[in-house]
Image (cartoon, rainbow, N blue to C red):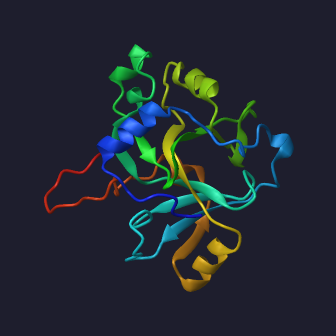
Amino acid sequence: MRSGICLQPLRDATRAVCAFLLLFGTSWPTSADNAKPLTAILLVARAELPDPNFKDSVVLVMNNIGSAPAGVIVNRPTKMAVSRLFPDLERLAQLHDKVYFGGPVEFGSVWFLFRTDTPREHAIQALDGVYVSANRELLRELLGRDKPMDGLRIFIGHSGWAPGQLEAEIARGDWTLAPAEKDAIFNGKSEHPWPAQQTPGAAQGS
């Protein structure tokens, strides 16, 4: 279902991620061999969408990674630094990049999107030149590059819908459909931090 849990304070989210670091569901396809034909779109939430999990969100939705549509919110950075995921990788402490809130489902899980022209083991194509994975060792490999966050975005939690649920929400006008493009995912300005600002004048995450 789309909303698996309620929003919690970021400090609780941080503890959850540290405690369940890269704890992934058994339904994740292990390779492109058992994935469905690729179809990916961007969903843009309508103005004043009441669901706080998806307010002001842009969601990359894929139909080839499970039995129903699933994806990640691409414009909701948290205040958590990427370095918190792998405290043993000291070189990451210099990075200012943040982990993103991918959605309210399986909040103890970590997914990531990365750009590559070459198919990779333990990753599934999300769109042309972009792959999605939840594999710990692959993520560590990408973070070991000279420019670890180049073409890489990391998410805690993901978004999902029951069969027929997303179609009903689109028909109701909750979402506007847009092409799934690499620049919209990796180069778009993230203006809606997570958790949402609670008090006037509160500082927002980058």
* Direction from residue 79 to residue 22 in the image, left or right: right
Q: Is residue 202 visible?
A: yes
Residue 110, image x and y in percent?
54, 39
Q: Name the residue furthest left.
A: 201
Residue 106, image x and y in percent?
54, 49
Q: Is residue 98 visible?
A: no
Residue 56 vs 125, above or below: the answer is below
Residue 120 sits in which quadrant?
top right
Q: Which quadrant would the C terminus be assigned to in this image?
A: top left
Q: Name the residue furthest right.
A: 33
| 85 vs 143, nearest the viewer | 85
Residue 149, image x and y in percent?
48, 31
Residue 12 sits in which quadrant?
top left
Residue under the image location 33 percent in, 22 percent down: 94
Residue 154 vs 62, above or below: the answer is above
Residue 48 vs 14, above or below: the answer is below
* Direction from residue 25 to residue 196 in the image, left or right: left
Residue under the image location 37 percent in, 36 percent down: 15
